[in-house]
Each structure stands twice: as C-alpha cells, then as structure tokens.
Amino acid sequence: MAYILNIVSIEKCDSYSADEIRKAIERSYKNLGGLEKYIKKGDKVFLKANLLKKNKPDDAVTTHPAIVEAVASTIKDMGAIPIIGDSPAGPFSERALRSIYETTGMIDVAKRTGAELNYNTEEIVVKISDGKLIKQATFMKALMECDSIISLPKLKTHGMTVYTGAVKNQFGAIPGLVKAGYHLSMPDVKDFSDMLIDINVFLKPVLSIMDAVIAMEGNGPSAGKPKKVGLIISSNDVFSLDTVATLIIGLNHEDAPTVFMAQRRGLGRFEDIKIIGMNIDDAKVSNFDIPTLRGFSVTEKIPPFLMKYLDKHVKPYPIFDYDVCKSCGICVSNCPPKALKMIDKKPIVDLKTCIRCFCCQELCPHKAVSIKKPHIAKLFYR
C-alpha cells in the first residue's frame, strides 16, 4: 500500500464577507480532494464549532458564524444533514445552549442554511481501548450518533496549553461540567494533552477547518486580543493542522504541549504533511503574542525532583482585578478543584488548592482575571 501524506490546505482569506469565506472554503475542499471524499449524501454531520461561552463573533473567542454557515451550506447542498453544536463551559442545558447559540450567531446560521442546532444534552460513556492515558470517556450523545464530525476550531492562545486549535477543540465533545473532572484528575499539562490526543484518535474528525481569519493572541482563549492572520487552514488530520498552524504563528512545537506530545506518538509530524495552497513561509505572521508555557518543561530538561519543587513555588497563578470584577460568581461555580470562594462578594483563590487550569480566566465574561508569573519563573519558563 502506498504511503499517503496528511494534507494541510492554507488559503488566504482577509475578511468574513460571505463571498470571500465561501470561495476560500471551496478552494480548501478542492485542495483536500473534494468534500465528497469525506461526506456522503444522507450523512448526519456534526459541525463541532468552538463555542466556548457567550461572546459575540467580533470578540474572536468563538468560531465565526460565517465559517460555520459556509460549511453548513455545502453540507446541505450535497444532501447531507449538518448539525451545529458544542458543549460550552458551564452547565450543559438546553437553556444554556440556546443563549450561546443566540449570542454567537449560530441561530441565524441555522435559519439561513436549514442546518440543525443540537439541543440534546444526553451523555454517553464510551470505551477507548487504544487510549494511552484514558480508557473511557463521557461524550455528548448527539455527537456520537452522527456519521462523521467536521471540526471548526478557532486559532487562539491558551493559558494552560499555550495554544488551542484543532486538537483542543474536541474537548468540547465532553459535556459541560464533566470537563471539570478531567481538569481535576489531569492538572499536569502533559497528561492533559495526552488525554486530548486520545479523544481525537478515537473521534477521528474527517475534516478540520480552522477559523484563522481573525485569531486571538495574548491572554487567550477568551481575554486576549484579536489578531488578523487572514487564513483558512484546513486538513484531513487534526494533528497535522495544529503542526502547521503553530508554525504559522511562530510557536515552537516543543512549547506547544498538544503538538509536542502528539509528535512523540508519531502524529502530526511535519515530514508526514503535504501543504497545498499558500506557501507556509508566505502565510507566517510576525509578532504573534504567545503566552508562556504553564508547565516547566514538556521536554523534561529539568530533573523531576527539581521540577516538582519549582512547580510548587514559582508556577503562575490567577489574579483578579476587583475594579473590573462584577461579582457574578462564574469563576467560583466553574472552578474544578473548588479553589475559589466568594468573600465579601469577591473571588478569593486558595493557591494550595489551585491546579492552574485557569478556567477562571477562560470563563470570566468581564476579563477580570489574568495570569501572574513570579519574577523567578522567568528563569525556568519558556
């Protein structure tokens, strides 16, 4: 059998105008061998967008509705059934989903395209026999009932995993508050990354189409700044897409845990990728603000005994701007280890209990949480 490279398509796309998005995605399909290679007439296709929380499209937190609309329309046109969905942070309920779909523009997408919106909040536990770190997982039942998955990630930075893209997008397949258990049981970023890899190997999205028109840099995945990249990056392999996307923003693979840990397992290696469309050097962006790695060293250059001591005393921690904080309590109710308490209507963190998942920073609707790095940490963090 001939060896087949994974394909990554890079297409220029300077705006979210419907016509420009449609043309860029159509070119992407062609680069990947045609949509009909992956989807058949009558298939139920789950369009797994990144709908982290209630943010408007221009905030650059969620997958832009123009991307979702273009993909949903082409799926519908070929006689398949597009189902738009995600399991955002917080409670996984019909009420929460309806609110997020409204704010992120998905309700309008469904009206214009005839796509379905998922309101099924049932869960299902499945065995992952080949998993390296996990042997079973709890997923959205609606996603598991579909014939295939198309992942529609957003290119963003991330406080815990440095970068969030195609691989991290599938964490949303885990329903609502169940995610907290995974954070709590896997506070080490290497283990967390291996868990994400296990999930993707099992789910096997047939295509991943990344919204990299306007990305997010800095204090991502929700409190950073929009950054124009002007690209649609697509692949038939989630790991290959992230390998190329991180190169485009100037992030070394050894500093991106999900990419590095995947490559250690022979997944997403650059030598196994065929790039079609734009030349990767022409696609690269300069001065992309990338946060420091949360853990000390995915390459384990620091002795384990020293790493354990340093991780205890100088690792980053969340700080709260009480002038900005609205005392909504979202951070407290969604803290996996229950390290936060409301005292005098303000969140207070117990750093001995905090696992540095930074869910508080990720979910704060007011951008009142930032990540503080002690000065000595600069000697050890990348």
Image (cartoon, rainbow, N blue to C red):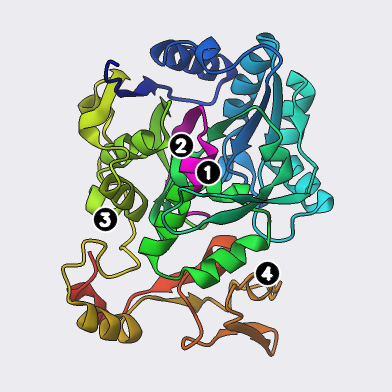
In the rendered image, the quadrant that contains the N terminus is top left
| Callout 1 crowding tier (Cα within 10 Å): few <14, some 14–19, many ≥20 | many
Contact between labelled residues 2 and 1, with CB atoms less than 8 Å apart: yes
In depth, the one of 258 and 195 nearer the eye is 195
Q: In this view, does 200 lie to the left or right of 326?
A: left
The amino acid type, in three-letter code, at marker 4 is Ile
The residue under label 1 is: 60
Q: Which residue is drawn at 44% across and 17% down?
A: 28
The amino acid type, in three-letter code, at marker 3 is Asp
| Callout 3 crowding tier (Cα within 10 Å): few <14, some 14–19, many ≥20 | many
Contact between labelled residues 3 and 4, with CB atoms less than 8 Å apart: no
Element marked by disc 3: helix
On residue 214, which mark appears? 2
Element marked by disc 1: loop
Q: Which residue is drawn at 68% across and 31% down?
A: 146
Q: Distance between the residues labelled 3 and 2?
A: 22 Å
Q: How far apart are marks 1 and 4 (CA)?
A: 20 Å
In the rendered structure, which segment of residues is drawn in magenta? 199-222
The residue under label 3 is: 255
